Amino acid sequence: MGKMKLVDLTHPFHADIPVWPYFAKPKIDTMHSLAKSGVLTQKIDVVMHCGTHADAPRHVMEYEFDGKRARYTHELPLDAYYGDAVCLDIRVDKWGLITAKHLDDALARAGVTHEEVNGMVLVLRTGMHLKFDDTKEYYHYSCGCGREAGQWFEKYKPKCVAMDMQALDHPLHTTMGKNGPPKMNLIGDSGRPITEEYIEKFGIEAYAEFEKDVFIKTFGLEKYMEAYGKLERHGLEGTWEPCHKYMMGNGIVGVENIGGDLEKVVGKRFKFMSFPIRWWLGDGAMVRCVAEIDEDDLNPVPDRVYKYGGF
């Protein structure tokens, strides 16, 4: 057994960090410089859901499924984003929707039982972290989770799920598609909306999972309520970030945009450490995510080199 090593699982933060499609980029200004003031002091104006960051239940819902008001960051236990973890190698196609089958397969290859998942931190590695950049490839065309993955998490009860993707949900389950008030329906590489591209590639029945009206038109209201009824009865728009809501509604917190040297721990067990700032009434916060692991158990890969934003 070797000595324990800390592995950074966090994307570097700076003024040109890639941000979610309708977020303003961080503004970093220097208030004092060493030359003029003898000290360096900087200030930051930033959306806390930037780069590698944590989500609290209050981010997406008013009440958790137990009927209690959804908790803010300061109300979560200190170890909410900390604990025994495993990095699951999720093998899913580009733009694919992660299902229970993908999760079961990755769990089996990692040698973890469903019973062990209860109370663990799951780190999902899809490879999207290697594409982290201000690009459509990373945001528009990411793979991602949805209703079925959310129900899987609800069933097996990890304490936290960290993902190497742009969000806890597939992009078409977010406002990048036709969900939520913005309903941006962003333009894809073809010059047409990404919803049209998805339908062309996968068909209307596959796309229906992402848009309530299309689901009902395609499969009927009864089928929709079978699929999304728990969320709808809770006063939530079913197809809008269902994985977020199945997780947060059950007290399972999430971390988005996991990165850094994630490749060193794929398929491994380790101690996951991540702490948001102690933000009163916070909806989430940028975090420094770290894996503590025996150095003899690390995957033999080189340190991550970032090439975006002037690196």
Image: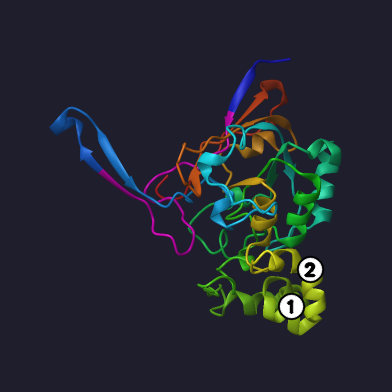
Instruction: Report the quarter where the N terminus lies.
Output: top right
Query: Residue 41 location in percent, x, y?
Result: 25, 35
Can residue 251 be seen in the rendering of this structure? yes
- Which residue is disc 2 drawn over? 227
Q: Residues within 10 Å of mark 2 (few under 14, many from 20)?
A: some
Above or below, comparing residue 188 to residue 60 in the picture: below
Residue 290 is one of the magenta-drawn residues: no
Residue 16 is one of the magenta-drawn residues: yes
Q: Give the range drawn in magenta.
A: 7-29
Give yes or no for contact between labels 2 and 1 (Cβ–Cβ under 8 Å): yes
Can residue 305 be seen in the rendering of this structure? no
Above or below, comparing residue 270 to residue 285 in the picture: above
Chief SS of the magenta region: loop
Q: Which residue lies furthest to the front in this view?
A: 67
- Which residue is disc 1 drawn over? 215
Determine the residue positioned at 68% across, 71% down: 210
